[in-house]
Amino acid sequence: MTRLFLLLFTLILSLCSVEAYGQIDSLSYALGYSYVITEMEFEKNLLKNENDFKEYLRGLEDNRKKLFLGQPQLSNDSSYMVSYALGGMKCRYIVDASYRKSGKQFPFFSCIIDGLRKVERNEITLPADTVAALAFIEKVIKENPNPEELDEETNCKFFTSYGIMKAFHPGLQAYIEGTMPGTQCKVNRQAYAEGMADFMEALTQKPDSPYFLGRKQAIEIFLTLLRTDKIDFDSYLLGTKAALGLGEELMTRENVVAILKTEFFPQE
């Protein structure tokens, strides 16, 4: 069973019915258990020992707290969370579009992230920095009809400027009000930039530590929960802990396999 196949499990949760196993959600537990087992196989260089397992779990739990605030859905009265989620969703669109266009890894995501992080850390002086960023973007586009021929330094500066300007898109507040009529949420541009940068890192950069790998997994669950509420993070976390040997095994591995087969291969 491949990691891609297990990722598919989380993406089609909205098509599945979920039954409780005692006080836990059985499918969510089984997914957490099976996913991390697969990660241990594919990421042997990162998940080698108990300390690595603890770091993976710490990354998963840290981002869980950040993304969900203890709840498995967004809070419509939280300007921070709505803006953060909006940044994450926009990031997914940008990443998907780049792959559809080129069919390969886009080389300058890290430069876009640099621009977004400047906004997140409040390192932008308004309006001077946004005016300068926009002027540079327009200059490059005007002078270089074939952007593939740009040198690496100019390209990176271009996409850093692009990252800065994405956080200052003029239509963000109107978008929030259009999707949530009557909302009191005001766009938080630092949170929007943070969400876009966090998700872009998770979707485009190879994990270099067990902690980052855990944070990446929390973001993948978050993306799933934007589409469906058919996953319980607490149960998912219990399954992950059990598979890592850091928590009580509430279901046998045989039961985990049986639940996944029943949910995804009912005719077999």
Image: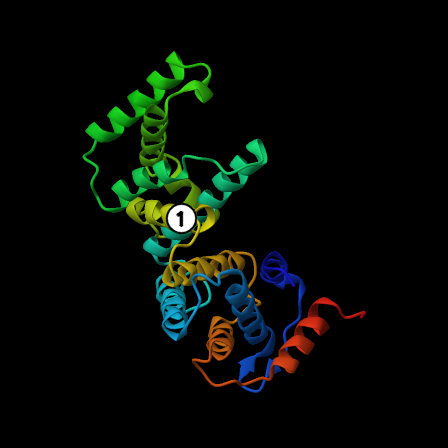
Residue 44 visible to the viewer: yes
Task: Give the labeled residue for mark 1.
Answer: 201
Rendered-image quadrant of the N terminus: bottom right
Q: Is residue 258 left or right of residue 208?
A: right
Residue lying farthest to the right in this orientation = 267
Element at label 1: helix
Q: Is residue 238 above or below residue 136?
A: below
Q: Which residue is at a point 69% across and 77% down the rendered structure image?
A: 258
Number of callouts:
1
Q: Is residue 10 above or below residue 143?
A: below
In-front residue for pair 188/54: 54
Residue 49 x/y as whole percent: 41, 72
Which residue lies at the image location 44% right of the left edge and 35% below the top edge? 107
Q: Position of residue 61 (x, y in %)?
A: 38, 69
Residue 173 position in % (x across, y down): 37, 42
Query: Tag 1: Cα neighbours inside 10 Å, few (<14), some, or many (≥20)?
Result: some
Q: Amino acid at mark 1?
A: Glu
Q: Which residue is found at the position 37% from the left and 64% from the top?
A: 59
Task: Please state the horizontal and vertical placement of residue 153, each as a whole percent of the image.
Answer: 32, 26
Of the 4 image quadrants, the one containing the C terminus is bottom right
> In the figure, residue 76 lies in which quadrant?
bottom left
Using the rendered image of the protein, determine whether residue 70 is visible from the camera's viewpoint.
no
Residue 230 relative to residue 47: left or right? right
Q: Quadrant of residue 33?
A: bottom right
